[in-house]
Amino acid sequence: MKPASPAFLSIRQVLKCLVAPPDDELENLLKLFKTRTLEAGEYFVRSGDRSFELGFMNSGLLRFFYQTDDGKEFNKSFITENQFAAAYSAFLTRLPARFSIQAIEKSHLLICDLALVVNLFDQHRCWEKLGRLLAEQLYIKKETREAEFLLDDAETRYLNFQTNYPGLEDRLTQYHVASYLGITPVMLSRIRRR
Amino acid sequence: MKPASPAFLSIRQVLKCLVAPPDDELENLLKLFKTRTLEAGEYFVRSGDRSFELGFMNSGLLRFFYQTDDGKEFNKSFITENQFAAAYSAFLTRLPARFSIQAIEKSHLLICDLALVVNLFDQHRCWEKLGRLLAEQLYIKKETREAEFLLDDAETRYLNFQTNYPGLEDRLTQYHVASYLGITPVMLSRIRRR
DNA sequence: TGCCCTCATTAAACTGGTTTAATGAGAAAC
DNA sequence: GTTTCTCATTAAACCAGTTTAATGAGGGCA
């Protein structure tokens, strides 16, 4: 599968839009990637992993989730088409991943060793900038979520979820939505009744 | 107050350690800063503000906090010596700040217009890198906090706070600690009894 | 010494959410 | 058509943390 194939169309566009890389740098980066398909239920990262890949989603749906010792799960975010996916914080801190990443729908990705991408940071400023922009996006997303947990009750968080992730609710079971909101399916059902 | 003065010693060290800037670039950056003192209770940023400064703490203690419509406050983080302080997410998104930053102790800072620093990103790679590293730090901090809220109960969060911010508890009233943990002072008092 | 003032503790009623368990409802398997 | 999944709903008991309010305990200050 070569960087000229249709699978590379989206990532090309996204990267051009984000950091406007020179053509040769862009090709350098793209040839590090290969395609991968995850079946529904399959894992991209498992909690405890120490080696990491960067994924770019061509299609499908991933969830990032924490697990407690007694088996409870907490979805922390969802990733869909044209977004990057990685256990980036674990890579940066060189600690084992604290959460898992799992496909909820069959998903088509481009993947690449994360360390190879980070090595490019020193090679050209556009990749350093990419690293900055991705970190900024992640930061803003997490901070927004922190604000929701501190300021909003469960019902408000549910309404926010509907507007922030339009259409996503239909692709998820009530269990996954509830887990993202930090409540039980029972409570979500009660909220929905209103 | 010139960049040669003692007030610039710490920021010099921190920047050298983070991004190893060339001497002339470092001086370029430092001459953008001037000193500022905040009395206890004084604000560095107010919720709703649209223009932002980057602060570097020489001494003192700041809190970042959200406020609800009915006046309740939620501390989201604390900043002490040798750390940078800014409403960075608001700056990045060009939205009004959603939280306030206030001095809990009398604080000595170096401050500078945030936009001037961000303009330097294109001038030299070391500043682009600085932007990346700061965003990464913020991201990791927020993600850690998200994990705590999802996985841990109030008592565990309290114990985490004590180990993650050693000595800080003694500089804060019980109200501020409780607000950071997402509980009431009453509940914190009960936890402490155990 | 006595008077504030602010902060910490304790108790009691209350509430938003959980837990457990039973019931319903749709879709796939055969 | 019946069985058997999985997922959503509903009810009832329960619990972690809130709210309100009263009490205590220290510090600054005239």
Image: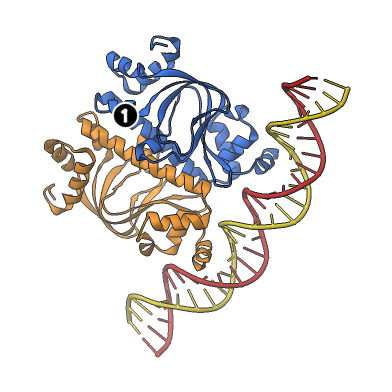
Chain colours: A blue, B orange, C red, D yellow
Q: Position of residue B115 (x, y in %)?
A: 27, 36
Residue sitting nearer the eye, B32 or A26:
A26
Residue A12 visible in rendering: yes
- Residue A39 is left or right of residue A45, and the answer is right
Which of the 4 image quadrants contains residue C4? bottom left
- Residue A97 is left or right of residue A30, and the answer is right
Which residue is under mark 1? A118
Q: Position of residue A72 (x, y in %)?
A: 58, 43
Residue at 20% over, 45% down: B33
Residue at 25% over, 24% down: A124
Q: Residues within 10 Å of mark 1 (few under 14, many from 20)?
A: some
Location of residue A93 with respect to B119 vertically, above or below: below
Which of the 4 image quadrants contains residue A110? top left
Location of residue C9 with respect to A43 vertically, above or below: below
Chain ID, mark 1: A
Location of residue D21 with respect to B9 vertically, above or below: below
Residue B48 visible in rendering: no
- Residue A28 is left or right of residue A170, and the answer is left
Q: Position of residue B166 (x, y in %)?
A: 36, 58
Residue sitting nearer the eye, C30 or B172:
C30
SS under mark 1: helix
Residue at 44% over, 47% down: B145
Q: Position of residue C28 (x, y in %)?
A: 72, 21
Residue sitting nearer the eye, B60 or D15:
D15
